[in-house]
Image (spheres, grey):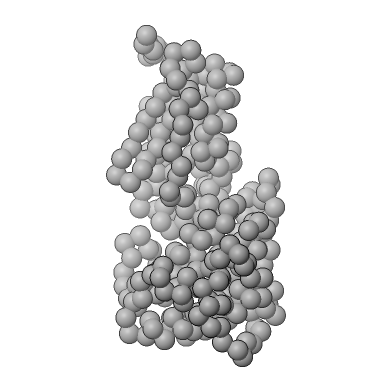
Amino acid sequence: SRCVINPNNYTNSKILLIGTGGIGCELLYCLARTGFKTIEAIDKDTIEISNLNRQFLFRVTDVGKSKVEIIEVLNIFLSPEARSHVNRMCLQSNVPLVDCGTGGYLGQVMVFIKNKTECYSCTPQPIPTTYPVCTIRNTPSKLIHCVVWAKNLYSELFAETEGEDNSEEIENEDTNIMSINKWFLKNNKNVDNLMKKIFIDDIENLLRMSNLWVDRKPPDTLPQELIKSKFTVPLNKKEMASTLSEDHVPDVKDCVQRFKNCLNELMIFNKNIPVPFDKDNNICICFVGAAANIRAHLFGISK
């Protein structure tokens, strides 16, 4: 069987576009230029610096804003669960579904038509090994999201040489866009200032995006008194190694102590050379575990 498009009336067809990322921006542009008159786009993402090299509908001045504010679309987030939901809705409504995606250097397009092809949920979907940037940075819902965020924080702080260019980084002093590494250097490597930025200021910025919290509980910020607290007894190696242990999950106060201790230790090692993440290094694991547990606590994620 085949689908025949009547060139005289196809532009009057209604299209629902879910996701305005790299593929979505290009597709939205092409559909509009082709002449489709009714296109409703759905996305629950906010614009990140790393989006700008491939999502050409957005500019540096748009960073941090909801995509719906820029391209005037309805707001929702696409994920494997959302794909399954859309699949069910299309089956119930007898509407063809075109699913597009990328993985590394590979891309795929799949068409699902009721009673003519398999549906999206007919075959087992692979367990994802990577996660959307917007989920990691803005709306984590699982502990693994917080761990990925913490490992990324570690890499930005310690795995790069000071002043090293990042091909996906766009620095703009006027819009406060710079890497966390350069921000940390600019603030004289002050640990309390760093904690305030990532556990208070950045979260307060997220809270201003009210559309993100319509259907989910908004995060909390870390109390200032915890950040300013002084810890006189350093952690030993055993205590550091227990940060990500399933047998012992430290409370948020312990995690703040671990974060500060490890950060100070890593700054000593990182004085002259980068310190790549090493899973066998207790200090690296302690830093990531402490940062991930603090973030999970603030976002109300169960251990």
| Residue lying at the far left of the rendered structure | 105
- Nearest to the observer: residue 278 or residue 146: 278
- Nearest to the observer: residue 269 or residue 188: 269
Residue at horizontal 61 percent and vertical 61 percent from the top: 296
Say whether residue 176 is visible: no
In the rendered structure, the answer to whether residue 24 lies left or right of residue 163 reads right
Q: Position of residue 179 (x, y in %)?
A: 42, 69
Say whether residue 235 is visible: yes
Residue at horizontal 35 percent and vertical 71 percent from the top: 276
Q: Position of residue 178 (x, y in %)?
A: 43, 69
Q: Position of residue 12 (x, y in %)?
A: 48, 18
Q: Is residue 250 above or below residue 34?
A: below
Q: Position of residue 107 (x, y in %)?
A: 33, 37
Image quadrant holding the N terminus, namely top left
In the rendered structure, the answer to whether residue 274 lies left or right of residue 298 reads left
Q: Is residue 108 above or below residue 281?
A: above
| Residue lying at the far bottom of the rendered structure | 232
- Nearest to the observer: residue 269 or residue 39: 269
Q: Is residue 52 above or below residue 200?
A: above
In the rendered structure, the answer to whether residue 18 lies left or right of residue 109 reads right
Residue at horizontal 41 percent and vertical 23 percent from the top: 111
Q: Is residue 283 above or below residue 214?
A: below
In the rendered structure, the answer to whether residue 22 lies left or right of residue 139 reads left
- How many labels, in total? 0
Residue at horizontal 55 percent and vertical 71 percent from the top: 242
Image quadrant holding the C terminus, namely bottom right
